[in-house]
Every structure is written in C-alpha cells, then in structure tokens.
Amino acid sequence: MPEPTYWESLKSEGGAVLDRLKQLVHEGNVRSVRVRQGDRVVAVFPVTAGVVGIVVAPLLAAVATLLALLSDCTIDIERVDKDDKTREKNGESSSGEDRIAV
C-alpha cells in the first residue's frame, strides 16, 4: 500500500522560500516539487529518497531561476505523511486539517 502524502504550498516571497525548500528536502520526506504560476504548472521536479544530497543543488538552482523569471509563483511540495503511520499505530485518526491529502 502506498504511503499517504500531502501537499504543502509556499508562496514565492524572496529568498526565504528557497531556504524553506532546502530545509524540507533535507528532512527527507519530500516526493516532488512543483512550480506553479497561477493555475498553470510550470515545472515538476521528482525527488528520490537516498539521492537527496546530489539532487538539492540543481533542484534549488532550477527553482531559483524559475522564481527569478516568473512572477506570482507558488511552490507545491508533495511530502510523505510519516505522522499518519504513528497516528494509526496509536489508534488515532488523521484529520488533515491543514493538509491536502493525495
């Protein structure tokens, strides 16, 4: 059974979004990064677990270039919900209030 995932969105507001993206990728539960301009998906970058160190620099460079060229961008990050497994073991339900489940 596939692991449950959710999407987190970051609005492009200066260099802070790149720092946050770098932090999230280093946490190791990121599946893919998607750059949107309005409703249009501009680029999708799959992130494979285990090669995070190799992927981070080109990923950040590509996202930074897109943010510099485009206005009104949003970064969507698909993450694995590791807490969901913990909640299931404890008999709790996952509410997903602030998350968009996939």
Image (cartoon, rainbow, N blue to C red):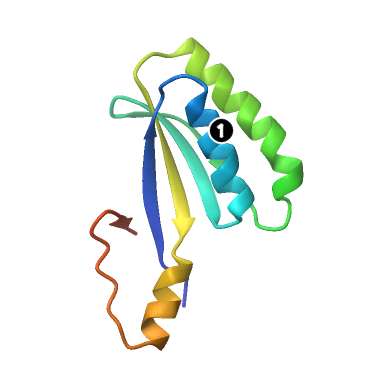
SS label for mark 1: helix
The quadrant of the image that shows the C terminus is bottom left
Residue furthest right as drawn? 54
Q: Label 1: how many residues lie within 10 Å, few (<14), some (14-19) or many (20+)? A: few
Residue positioned 43% across, 70% down in the render: 83
Residue positioned 32% across, 88% down in the render: 91
Q: Quadrant of residue 49?
A: bottom right
Residue 87 position in % (x across, y down): 37, 79
Is 11 situated left or right of 3 in this image? Answer: left
Residue positioned 52% across, 19% down in the render: 66
- Compared with 83, 86 (above or below) is below
Q: Nearer the viewer, residue 93 or 49?
A: 93
Residue 64 position in % (x across, y down): 57, 22
How many numbered circles does the render carry?
Answer: 1
Residue 47: tell me if it is visible: no
- The kind of residue tagged 1 is Asp
Residue 82: tell me if it is visible: yes
- Compared with 42, 32 (above or below) is below
Residue positioned 38% across, 46% down in the render: 8
Is 71 situated left or right of 95 in this image? Answer: right
Q: Nearer the viewer, residue 44 or 13?
A: 13
Per the image, the residue denoted by label 1 is: 19
Residue 43 position in % (x across, y down): 49, 31
Q: Quadrant of residue 94?
A: bottom left
- Compared with 86, 58 (above or below) is above
Residue 41 position in % (x across, y down): 39, 31
